[in-house]
Amino acid sequence: MRLAYQYRLRLTKQQIATLLHWLELCRRQYNYRLAERFNWYEQNRCDVDRCSIISCSIAPLKDRPDYFSQKRDLTNTKALFPDYKELPSHILQDVIARVEKTFDRWLKGDSNGKKSGRPRFKGNGRYRSLTFPDLIKPEHVQGKFIQLPDILHLTG
């Protein structure tokens, strides 16, 4: 049983430009959300066995940015940055899910307890894929054409 499909797309120049712009916006969003989590980690980090009252302030802990709080913040992002309005919301939510997965694997490890290295920020051209989490319905497939959101008919 196939759970995911990969399609080879033959795109027009305008569609290529749109997808490259979307990838750049996703990369920026990934880096921003990862930076939010690193800032939270640095502000709330203090080794219990080595923390003195003099060197570490005992300030109230900040709320941990998680998938749902960052997802709620996407409305502010779209209000402040008009470029993000053209991006389908499910794609941005998938970016946050990727950040959640990498950050949690760094802190907690996988199911075997094996931890990953510290997540890295994505440089130019290093964010290479978009995920359309919505199921493609039969009415979206017409012969060899697939209709994706906000992009006119793409050939597959």
Image (spheres, grey):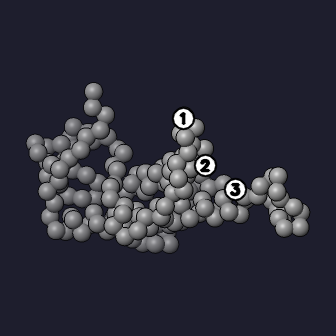
Mark 2 Cα shell of 10 Å, populated few (<14), some (14-19), many (≥20): few
Give residue 111's mark. 1
- State the separation of the CA atoms marked 3 and 2: 16 Å
Query: In this rendering, which labeled residue sits more in front, label 3 or label 2?
Result: 2
Q: Note whether residue 12 is visible.
A: yes
The quadrant of the rendering that contains the N terminus is: top left
Q: CA separation, marks 3 and 1?
A: 25 Å
SS for dot 3:
loop
In the rendered image, the vertical position of residue 27 relative to residue 9, given as above or below: below
Instruction: State the residue position of label 3.
Output: 63
The amino acid on which the numbered mark 2 sits, given as a three-letter code, is Leu
Disc 1 to disc 2, how far (Cα)?
12 Å
Which numbered disc, 3 or 1, marks the residue closer to the eye? 1
x, y percent for residue 142:
13, 43
Q: Residue at x 43, y 51 (%)?
A: 94
Write down the residue under mark 2.
107
